Amino acid sequence: MPLPLRHLFDYQLPLNYPIEPKQGMRVLAPFGKSDRIGIIDSISIVELSDPYLQKVKTITSIIDETSFIPESLIQLYRWLLQYYHGYCGEIWQTMLPTDFLSGQETRIARESVWKISDAGLNALNENLIRSSAVKQKMALTQLAQMPNGLSSQALTAIDISNTTIKTLAGKGWVTQEFTTASKQYLVKPESTLELTNEQLTAVEQISKSLDHYQCHLLFGVTASGKTEVYLQLIEQVLNNGRQALFLVPEIGLTPQTVKRFENRFDTEIALLHSGITNKQRFQGWLKAQSGEAKIIIGTRSSIFVPMKNPGIIIIDEEHDLSFRQQQGFRYSARDVALVRGKIEDVPVILGSASPSIETLLNVQRGKVNQLNLKHRAQTTQSLKFRIIDLKQQAMNQGLSVDLVKAIRQHLKERNQVLLFLNRRGYSPVLLCHQCGWSESCSRCDINFTYHHQSHFLNCHHCGSSRRAPTECSNCHSHEMTPVGMGTERLQETVSQLFPQARIARIDRDTTQKKSAMKNYVSAIKSGEVDILIGTQMLAKGHHFPNVTLVALIDMDGALYSADFRATEYAAQLITQVSGRAGRGDKAGEVIIQTHQADHPMLKQIIDQGYHDFANLTINERIETELPPHSYAAMFKAESHQSKDAEQFLMQVKSVLQQNGNSVFLAGPAPAFYFKKAGKYRYQLFLQSNERKQLHTLLQQSITKIDNLKLAKRVRWRLEIDPVGDN
Ligand code: ADP
Ligand code: ZN
Ligand code: ZN
């Protein structure tokens, strides 16, 4: 049953039921007061005389006549269940589309066209149509000129109604034809690029493993042409009659990405991402399942899409945190991809300019084969880096004199400038100049972000908001002052400094409308923008050849953090953001503003590159015995009463200690964001140098933990390989 429960329910099948049950089929079964849709997990046969049958309810019906869930996905489900210690119903809920679980029909929607029949042609030629039937004559005349027929929509557009068509169909003068399975796969060779030597080596090496599982890391600097490598491999996979699954980060699925695929392949591509309706998602899922969609492009949950004939799994920007699901059933799509690749026996490619430490350690351990693209595909120019030490610098609203000079220079040369600041809103605090009072979100205990244009305070943590005060609640002064800088304020500052420049700000606040991002991208590409200001959304994937200067306005926040992965994330961010510069034929410059100009990570990234930084980081993790060198899990609990969550985790800890082995336990401790949306949050951290030891302990303890009284009073989760604080 699709519920967050750790156990299954037994049902019996009516005697002589006409459909043979199979794993993965949907059934309708009595549950509580009504019938519910569930999935067949496994089947066993018992004697009719077995007294157990007396206690077991009978299913109402089997919905599917065949199973839509291939054996490989059932295997994957079993792996997820035991690796993540998850709830079976919740895992199926995560793996399957909503429309499938709600019992929708599994039919692929076909487009149909109306065509004129021989009888219709005859009627037209012999003038057998009543003279009053003007519309009928018009329809036949139109259709006679359209040997491929016209769809209902096309007919409506030329003012021919469904009723007219139905009448004609009744007379046998027109017929309806359904377009059968999709277009055949076809490469458009004109868009194929001649590979560089490095690209060629990568394609050749990976080609050798197309018929079995092997994980490759395509470690290619930004703009080295990783996408071209993917496209040429996918071409081979399609030539072998197989399907390709291409995963991208949440915000990486841009119209630009899709366009590159559509320009190359004339075939059915299923797109699966958060911007589509349930119905569209289900259609894409069905087309992947039936083998009709040759290419599936999607975000993290697409790793669960069934495929008739899988041939390759590609994860682009594999380091991206959006491959980690942070709500409900927590999993890492990248890690799941490796398991799926093994089960399906197909190659998996992880691509990135800044690979995760997890993947690089797997390379060291010989589990992943690394291929390098060290040079940019189109240019021989390398990036010029400059760190601006902000200590004691004269600043103009967050911009140093040197940065302003550099921007001016690049604009003068008629190039585009990208300013990166990972904080939206006007300022992170609005405080009273007289007494220092500021308002924070009472549900989260963190400062509200001030949004100037709307004059609102927003909590970026829980989403609550209110009008910004004009008067201090504490001393009633009217000097409420924004402190610090977000993108909204940066835009204001920049437009004052460069009144002639055309500025585009791209963040979550300015791209809420559906077509907004698309419009920005085309404006930037066609040179209608001089300065781009943006958050994360601008950091990755985009190819803007005229951007020659990229500036990271504030790198301080990213370097100060309690998370042991903070420098890894910051290094990835710098690599990705700076990769937006100099992608065309002009040289690129990258400027980093920071108060920590001596930070060793910055020096490594700039002088030696991400690769050397990563090697040092791996050694550090080994020395300090931190993941991915060791294996971690975390119990997280939250409750309205602070002590409930903490007490629950104390009890969890003692259960774990009773089962005692040498797994290291730390906590319970307050989470980094101790309060969120009115709840207090605690965590208990588990770590072991042996994965097996950790999992055995969890396996032995989980039922006891489920049965703790407090387990029903607090909200809690077990997370495997936890990242960040969510
Ligand atoms: P990445 O995915 O590694 O960031 P892209 O695939 O976006 O890089 O490639 C960057 C640019 O280089 C694109 O404009 C692409 O068309 C171009 N490019 C890639 N490979 C080649 C090649 N072999 N010859 C010429 N141009 C190439
Ligand atoms: Zn005050
Ligand atoms: Zn809040």
Image: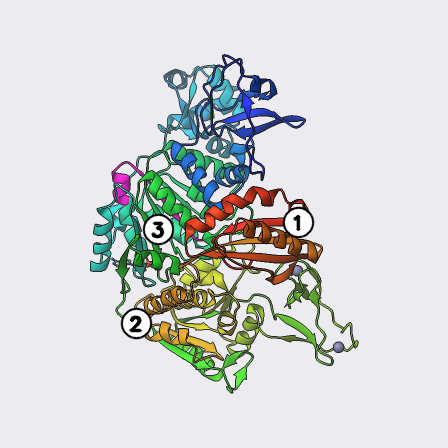
Amino acid type, residue under disc 3 in the picture: Arg
Residue stretch in magenta: 235-250
Q: Under 8 Å from ligand 1: the CB of mark 2?
A: no
| Location of residue 305 by image quarter | top left
Q: Is residue 241 above or below residue 380?
A: above
Viewer-closest of 455 and 594: 594
Q: How many marks?
A: 3
Instruction: Measuring from the top left, give residue 203's x and y in whole percent.
Output: 24, 51
User: Which disc number belongs to residue 376?
Assistant: none
Provide the residue designation for mark 1: 714
Q: In the displayed structure, does residue 668 sit left or right of residue 538?
A: right
User: Which disc number belongs to residue 382?
Assistant: 2
| Secondary structure beneath label 1 | loop
Q: Is residue 356 visible?
A: no
Tell me which residue sits at (31%, 40%) in the image: 345
Instruction: Measuring from the top left, give residue 400's x and y in whole percent.
Output: 49, 82
Quadrant holding the C terminus: bottom right
* Residue at mark 3 to residue at mark 2: CA–CA distance: 25 Å
Q: Earlier in the sequence, mark 3 or mark 1?
A: 3
| Location of residue 68 by image quarter | top left
Query: Ligand 2 falls in which quarter?
Result: bottom right
Viewer-closest of 271 and 18: 18
Q: Is residue 581 visible?
A: yes
Q: Is residue 595 above or below residue 252?
A: below
Quadrant holding the N terminus: top right
* Residue at mark 3 to residue at mark 1: CA–CA distance: 48 Å
Q: In the displayed structure, does residue 316 sit left or right of residue 234?
A: right
**Residue 236 colored in magenta in the image:** yes
User: Which disc number belongs to residue 260?
Assistant: 3
Amino acid type, residue under disc 1 in the picture: Val
Q: Under 8 Å from ligand 1: the CB of mark 3?
A: yes
Amino acid type, residue under disc 2 in the picture: Ser
